[in-house]
Every structure is written in C-alpha cells, then in structure tokens.
Image (cartoon, rainbow, N blue to C red):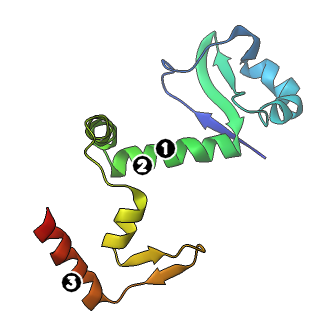
C-alpha cells in the first residue's frame, strides 16, 4: 500500500536525485516505486517541469508523519517541556519510578506483584511524607 502526498511547495524534502522523477517517468515505474517506498526512509519526489509537485511514501511513513503533526498541534510546547525536564533531571530534581507509583497508591512487592493501596492509606502516606520533607 502506498500514499501519494501532493505538496504546493517542497522546501524541507531531501531532494536525492536518485529518488526524484518526473511524473511521466513515475507513471511508467509506479509498481516499482510502490515497492521501494516500503523500505524505511525511502520516498520519491515527483516533479512537473522540473519543480517538485508530489511525494510518494509508504502508508506507514505517512501515518507516522500525520501522528507527529497531530502531537505537535496538540502539544505545541512539547519540545520546551522536554528541555525543561532534562534540565531538572540534570539538577537532580526528580523522583524515581517506584516513589512515583507509591505516591499514586501503587506498590510493587518484592516478587513483582502490583499492590494497590487504598485512598485512605495513600492520603496518610502523602501527609506523612510531606511532614518529613
């Protein structure tokens, strides 16, 4: 399965000459191209009168691009938040996963079983932890 994605202006697409074809040439090779784009990071740029007009990539890669764009729209500050988290980590401002789970009322026993702690006990532990800090 493949997807043809039409573009008005291509400025960020890697224009490898071995994967840039005229639309006329692509018509002749469409089945070969459809198979080739199934490989990771392979796409074809189709040109019309020497100008980029469309991109052919696998459906899987297209879906990945769409998901990435959706995340960028839903979380526009994600890159900034990741950078802040990395800086906090470098300063030692973090809690380990087991402590986080404990704060959320979940404990993992020595044999790896998950044990849910009641909300009452959870609140008592949080208050106790707050007093000791």
> In the rendering, which numbered label is found on residue 100?
none
Do callouts 2 and 3 mark residues in contact (Cβ within 8 Å)?
A: no
Q: Nearer the viewer, residue 127 or 30?
A: 127
Q: Position of residue 11 (x, y in %)?
A: 48, 17
Is disc 1 surrounded by few (<14), some (14 to 19) or many (20+) residues within 10 Å? few
Residue drawn at (68%, 46%), measured in percent from left and top?
60
Mark 2 or 3, which is nearer the eye? 3
For label 2, the SS is: helix
Q: Quadrant of residue 97?
A: bottom left
Is disc 3 surrounded by few (<14), some (14 to 19) or many (20+) residues within 10 Å? few
Q: Which residue is mark 2?
A: 71
Q: Which residue is mark 3?
A: 124
Do callouts 2 and 1 mark residues in contact (Cβ within 8 Å)?
A: yes
> In the rendering, which numbered label is found on residue 68?
1
Q: Nearer the viewer, residue 14 or 91?
A: 91
Left or right, 9 with reference to 3: left
Q: CA distance from mark 3 to mark 1?
A: 41 Å
Q: CA distance from mark 2 to mark 3?
A: 37 Å
Do callouts 3 and 1 mark residues in contact (Cβ within 8 Å)?
A: no
Residue drawn at (88%, 34%), measured in percent from left and top?
31
For label 1, the SS is: helix
Left or right, 101 with reference to 24: left
Examine the rendered structure and indicate whether residue 64 appears above or below residue 12. Answer: below
For label 3, the SS is: helix
Q: Nearer the viewer, residue 8 or 108?
A: 108
Q: CA distance from mark 2 to mark 1?
A: 5 Å
Q: Quadrant of residue 72?
A: top left
Q: Position of residue 64 (x, y in %)?
A: 58, 44
Residue drawn at (65%, 40%), measured in percent from left and top?
61
Q: Position of residue 102 (x, y in %)?
A: 36, 72
Left or right, 120 with reference to 1: left
The quadrant in which the C terminus is found is bottom left
């Amino acid at each position: 399965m493949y997807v043809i994605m039409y573009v008005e202006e291509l400025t960020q697409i890697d224009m490898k000459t071995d994967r840039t074809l005229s639309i006329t040439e692509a018509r002749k090779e469409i089945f070969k191209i459809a198979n080739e784009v199934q490989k990771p990071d392979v796409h074809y740029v189709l040109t019309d009168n020497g100008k980029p007009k469309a991109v052919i990539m696998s459906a899987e890669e297209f879906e990945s691009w769409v998901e990435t764009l959706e995340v960028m729209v839903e979380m526009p500050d994600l890159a900034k938040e990741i950078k802040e988290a990395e800086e906090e980590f470098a300063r030692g401002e973090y809690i380990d996963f087991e402590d986080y789970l404990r704060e959320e009322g979940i404990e993992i026993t020595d044999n790896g079983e998950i044990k849910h702690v009641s909300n009452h006990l959870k609140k008592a532990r949080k208050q106790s932890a707050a007093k000791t800090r």
